[in-house]
Amino acid sequence: MSGLSEGGPAARGDRVAVTVDGHVAFVALTRPDRHNALDPPMLDAIIAAAEGLRTRSGVRAVVLHGTGRSFCSGLDFPAVAAAGGLEAFGAVLDEPPPNRFQRVAYDWIELPVPVIAAVHGHCLGGGLQLALAADIRIAAPDARLSVMEGRWGLIPDMAITRTLPRLVGIDVAKELAFTARTVSGEQAHRLGLVTHLAEDPLAAASALAAEIATRSPDAVHRAKRLFDAGWTGSAGETLALEADLQRELIGTPNQLAAMRAAAGGDAAAFDR
């Protein structure tokens, strides 16, 4: 990644860094000494990054990745213990949904622009739930992925009900949670946990995000909304939504710009 624009870093801290290159935002987990494990400040920083991008003008796609040797190794139990132990987190579970834990993943699902996760190294527990919240996952063949919460006598609770059972069969989802086994990137691809394999997931995710950014942002936003709603809506609801969203697009400046670009073979100039 080079040539950062729009003022370089949009947000930077000791847990998460957000940079924008053209129309693509790069969200990096920046705790490499702990394999980007999730401590309380990291949870807050991930939520803040999603909140900031929700209203950031000009961003058409997001690449979510980890620095160092891993994407994210899950919950940092020593940090949790130092913050008062698991009991101290109980109040979070009493919050109305989505609670603080769930928002770490769910806010990316709700982001109107596509999110691509570039997965390498460890992608465990809460780290996997974060990756599952992306629209597309590109993983290294030797990445290590696990629904690991069962190892600690817990269940996965970071919005996994909105992701995993929709990507794999319910039986596969149950087996992964029951056993807490670790699978490689190649195995995860066969199971449907990841979309593509790449030796350099970040480079592949960056290229895909750049390709998406050449399309009308109005159409891409509505396509994401359409497919997300279609997972749970009835036939009548989703067919009506198709028509409603198409009606919103037809004849708009960006839709006409896309048509002119397609007909002429030139890049389209969209208004955001």
Image: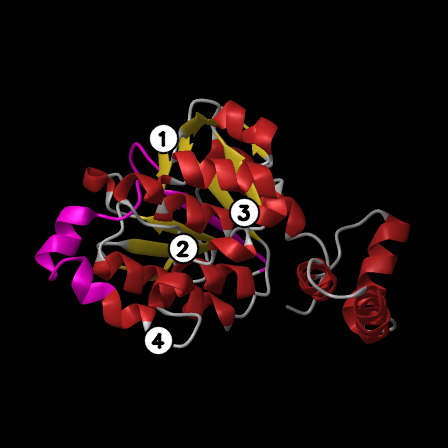
Q: Residues in magenta? A: 60-89
Q: Residue drawn at (40%, 55%), measured in percent from left and top?
A: 19
**Regarding mark 1 in the picture, which secondary structure is present there?**
loop
Q: Nearer the viewer, mark 2 or mark 1?
A: 1
The answer to whether one can see residue 21 in this image is no
Q: Reading the chain from its start, which is encountered first: label 2 or label 4?
A: 2
Q: Reading the chain from its start, which is encountered first: label 1 or label 4?
A: 4
Q: Reading the chain from its start, which is encountered first: label 2 or label 1?
A: 2
Residue picked out by circle 1: 121
* x then y, percent, for residue 14: 21, 54
Residue 200 vs residue 43: left or right? right
Residue picked out by circle 2: 19
**Regarding mark 4 in the picture, which secondary structure is present there?**
loop
Q: Reading the chain from its start, which is encountered first: label 3 or label 2?
A: 2
* x then y, percent, for residue 189: 57, 29
To which quarter of the image does residue 218 belong? bottom right
**Badge 3: few (under 14), some or many (20 or more) residues near its Cα, within 10 Å?**
many
Q: Nearer the viewer, mark 1 or mark 4?
A: 4
**Regarding mark 3 in the picture, which secondary structure is present there?**
helix
Against 242, residue 158 (above or below) is above
Residue type, mark 2 in image: Thr
Residue 147 vs residue 76: left or right? right
Residue type, mark 1 in image: Gly
Q: CA distance from mark 3 to mark 1?
A: 20 Å
Q: CA distance from mark 2 to mark 1?
A: 22 Å
Residue picked out by circle 3: 164
Q: Nearer the viewer, mark 3 or mark 1?
A: 3
Query: In the image, is residue 175 part of the stretch drawn in magenta?
Result: no
* x then y, percent, for residue 148: 35, 40
Q: Reading the chain from its start, which is encountered first: label 3 or label 1?
A: 1
Q: Nearer the viewer, mark 3 or mark 2?
A: 3
